[in-house]
Amino acid sequence: MRALVLAASALMLAAFGAEQAAAQPAACPADWRAAGMADGAERGAMREYQQACAMNVAAYEAGFDEGLRSFCAPASAFRLGRESGAEFRGECPIDLADGFVQAYEQGARARAAAAALSEAETSLTELLRDQRDVQRNLRNAAHRHRGGSQQANEAQQAAIDGVRARDAQLGGAIRRVQDAIASIRQQIADLRAEIGDRYGAW
């Protein structure tokens, strides 16, 4: 029917196939070529239609082959890897297979870096909030540390030392996360330099 090869065994992933299996059979289209083209371009996989449909197999497959070439184009593969993380379980034409794999992997790298940056920035926000709370507690404890018995002063000083230790701990954690954020941003910049505008703006 078509000269197709698997894009890559690494892309034979379960979630995309499970999503297809869970979908209900589609209604009968009026234009089988257009339906095949849409399934190829949007899904990269043939859709299950209701048994009552009188499918024009030749028209559907011709449309599907045409749509699949659009789906397997590098820009589409990059977008699939970067934006949705959807897992492709289909096949790409042999002349597009290598480009699909490369673009998908680059998109997946971009997606992973963006997720790592978001996670690190969230951690930094939380650490800075904790640091503000600790430093406020430290100021309050220092304000209360006036007069009183020697025993009370020693206990208060111990509490202050504990808060200071926590403040120092948070400061170290903040610096590490800031370094991680700078490193991730550099990775993203390097990836942008590597890819350029090959797949369009991203």
Image (tube, rainbow, N blue to C red):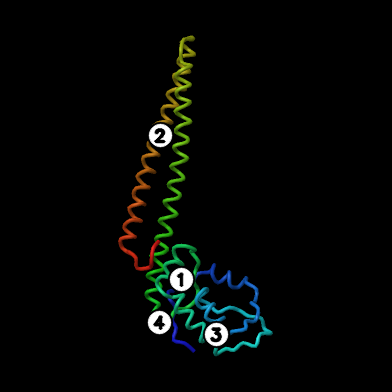
Residue drawn 61% across the image and 79% down it: 48
| Picture layout, residue 139 above or below residue 122 | above
The picture places residue 199, in percent across and down from the top left corner, at: 38, 68
Counting labels gives: 4
Which of discs 1 and 4 lies nearer the camera? The answer is 4
Q: Which residue is mark 3?
A: 33
Q: Position of residue 169 (x, y in %)?
A: 40, 34
Q: Nearer the viewer, residue 152 or 88?
A: 88
The residue sitting at 48% across, 12% down in the picture is 151
Residue under label 1, please give it.
Answer: 11
Instruction: Mark 3 and mark 1 in contact? Answer it, CB < 8 Å.
Output: no
Q: Which residue is mark 2?
A: 169
What amino acid is at disc 4? Ile
Q: Secondary structure at mark 4?
A: helix
SS of the residue under disc 1: helix
Name the foreground residue: 7 vs 47. 47
| Mark 3 Cα-neighbour bin, 10 Å: few <14, some 14–19, many ≥20 | many
Q: Residues within 10 Å of mark 1 (few under 14, many from 20)?
A: some
**Crowd band around label 4 with a 10 angstrom C-alpha radius: few (<14), some (14–19), many (20+):** some
Nearer the observer: mark 4 or 3; the answer is 3
- Please give the residue where the numbered disc 4 appears in the rendered image: 94
Dot 1 or dot 4, earlier in sequence? 1
Decide which of tag 2 and tag 4 comes sooner along the chain: 4
